[in-house]
């Protein structure tokens, strides 16, 4: 399943705190679509299915992934950068054989 870097964990925690709902977790999913075949989807979710995989990172950051997405995210890392050249979340996925220029889709 996907792991979070320390910087990603801190940023997700900050965003969760702003939401003000302790039942929320970060859901990371892979969906068909995008210019390379699959695209990443991330959002806060309070609903956890029985077959979802869950992990905890940092201070109370829960990440949930559905089983089919988990197969495509095995060994992947979610990072957060806040700099002049790059800002935002990025997924480094060793399962992706190719990705598009926008970085949001892969195959």
Image: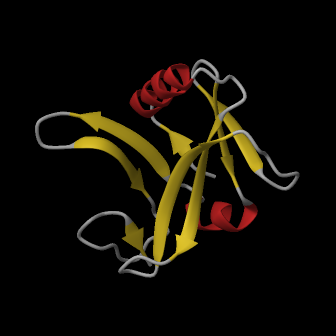
Residue that lies at the very extreme toward the right in this rendered image: 50
Give the quadrant of residue 61.
top right
Give the quadrant of residue 60.
top right
Residue that lies at the very extreme toward the left in this rendered image: 84
Q: Is residue 87 left or right of residue 78?
A: left
Residue at horizontal 48%, vertical 75%? Answer: 38
Q: Is residue 91 left or right of residue 28?
A: left
Q: Give whichever of 84, 98 is nearer the camera.
A: 84
Report the number of numbered marks.
0
Give the image's coloring scheme. secondary structure
Q: Is residue 64 left or right of residue 39?
A: right
Residue at horizontal 65%, vertical 24%? Answer: 21
Residue 84 x, y percent position in the rendering = 11, 36
Residue 78 x, y percent position in the rendering = 45, 45
Residue 39 x, y percent position in the rendering = 46, 69
Q: Is residue 34 above or below residue 50?
A: below
Question: Looking at the rendering, in which quadrant would you find the C terminus?
Answer: bottom left
Residue 5 x, y percent position in the rendering = 45, 35
Give the quadrant of residue 22.
top right
Q: Is residue 97 above or below residue 24?
A: below
Residue at horizontal 55%, vertical 47%? Answer: 43
């Amino acid at each position: 399943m996907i792991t979070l870097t320390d910087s990603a964990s801190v940023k997700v925690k900050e965003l969760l705190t702003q939401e003000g709902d302790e039942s929320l977790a970060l859901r990371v999913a892979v969906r068909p679509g995008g210019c390379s075949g699959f695209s990443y989807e991330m959002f806060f979710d309070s609903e956890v299915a029985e077959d979802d995989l869950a992990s905890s990172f940092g201070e109370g950051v829960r990440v949930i992934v559905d089983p089919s997405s988990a197969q495509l995210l095995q060994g992947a890392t979610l990072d957060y950068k806040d700099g002049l050249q790059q800002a935002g979340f990025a997924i480094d996925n060793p399962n992706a054989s190719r990705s598009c220029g926008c970085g949001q889709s892969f195959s």
